[in-house]
Image (tube, rainbow, N blue to C red):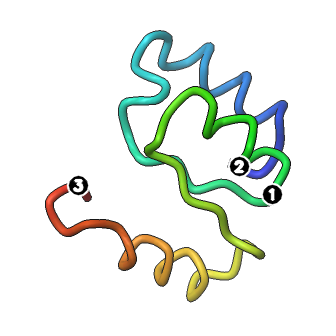
Amino acid sequence: ISSGEAWRYWQQLTGAEATRSWLVVLGQRLFQQLQLLTPRVVSVSDLQPQTIEQALLSLPPDTV
């Protein structure tokens, strides 16, 4: 998720399920906001495929 607006759209699409999956977010501010809603959030510094892959690989194996 790359912005607050994208988060709002995600919430509209998924409703109560919005925080059930792990969320990969761009930026510290959005990370801090979403961390108040769920512990299942990880922040990335850019949207390069390698960066996202590394973030996903850092998650506990039973949660992906």
Residue found at x 42% / y 47%: 22
Vertical placement of 38 versus 11: above or below? Answer: below
Cβ–Cβ below 8 Å for labels 1 and 2?
yes
Q: Which residue is mark 1?
A: 28
Separation of marks 3 and 2 at Cα, in angstroms? 19 Å
Residue 2 image position (x, y, % from top left): 77, 51
* Residue positioned most to the bottom: 50
Whichever of labels 3 and 2 marks the residue nearer the N terminus, that label is 2
Kind of residue at disc 2? Phe
Left or right, 39 with respect to 30, comes to left
Tell me the SS state at disc 1.
helix
Cβ–Cβ below 8 Å for labels 3 and 2?
no
Residue found at x 44% / y 45%: 40
Residue 15 image position (x, y, % from top left): 50, 11
Whichever of labels 1 and 3 marks the residue nearer the N terminus, that label is 1
Left or right, 55 with respect to 17, comes to right
Q: Which residue is mark 3?
A: 63
Tell me the SS state at disc 2.
helix
Q: What mark, if any, has residue 31 been given in the picture?
A: 2
